[in-house]
Amino acid sequence: MTHHKLELPEKTCEACARPFAWRRKWAQSWAEVRYCSDACRTWRRGAVRERMTKPEKGA
């Protein structure tokens, strides 16, 4: 059995901007996948949360 990983679809992670390839566990939800890993997903959520709670400078 030969594996052809070069033929898998790719996306770019919204947190780290690195490309990542399709995985079998994402088969049902590939259209909704935005991050390459749990670490990027939690980092992105923390960054958004920080922006929302920090007061803006000059305000």
Image (cartoon, helix red, strand yellow):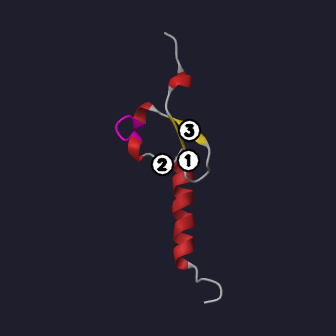
What secondary structure predominates along the stretch shown in magenta?
loop
Q: Where's residue 42, x and y in %? A: 52, 57
Q: Name which residue lies at 59% across and 40% down.
A: 19
Residue extending farthest right: 58
Residue type at the position of mark 2: Arg
Q: What's the mark number on residue 13?
A: 1
- In the image, is residue 53 above or below residue 25? below
Are the two marked residues, 3 and 1, in contact with CB atoms closer than 8 angstroms? yes
Q: Which residue is mark 2?
A: 34
Quadrant where the C terminus is found in the figure: bottom right
- In the image, is residue 35 above or below residue 49? above
Residue type at the position of mark 3: Phe
Q: Residues within 10 Å of mark 1 (few under 14, many from 20)?
A: some
In magenta segment, residue 29: yes
Instruction: Indicate the secondary structure of the residue bearing disc 2.
Output: loop
Q: Quadrant of residue 46?
A: bottom right
Instruction: Indicate the secondary structure of the residue bearing disc 1.
Output: loop
Q: Name which residue lies at 52% across and 17% down.
A: 3
Q: Where's residue 58, x and y in %? A: 65, 88
Are the two marked residues, 1 and 2, in contact with CB atoms closer than 8 angstroms? yes
Q: Compare marks 3 and 2 and give the one earlier in the sequence.
A: 3
Q: Which residues are magenta?
A: 26-30
Q: Name which residue lies at 39% across and 43% down.
A: 31
Residue type at the position of mark 1: Cys
Q: Where's residue 35, x and y in %? A: 51, 48
Q: Residues within 10 Å of mark 3 (few under 14, many from 20)?
A: some
Q: CA distance from mark 1 to mark 2?
A: 6 Å
Residue extending farthest top: 1
Q: Compare marks 1 and 2 and give the one earlier in the sequence.
A: 1
Q: Which residue is mark 3?
A: 20
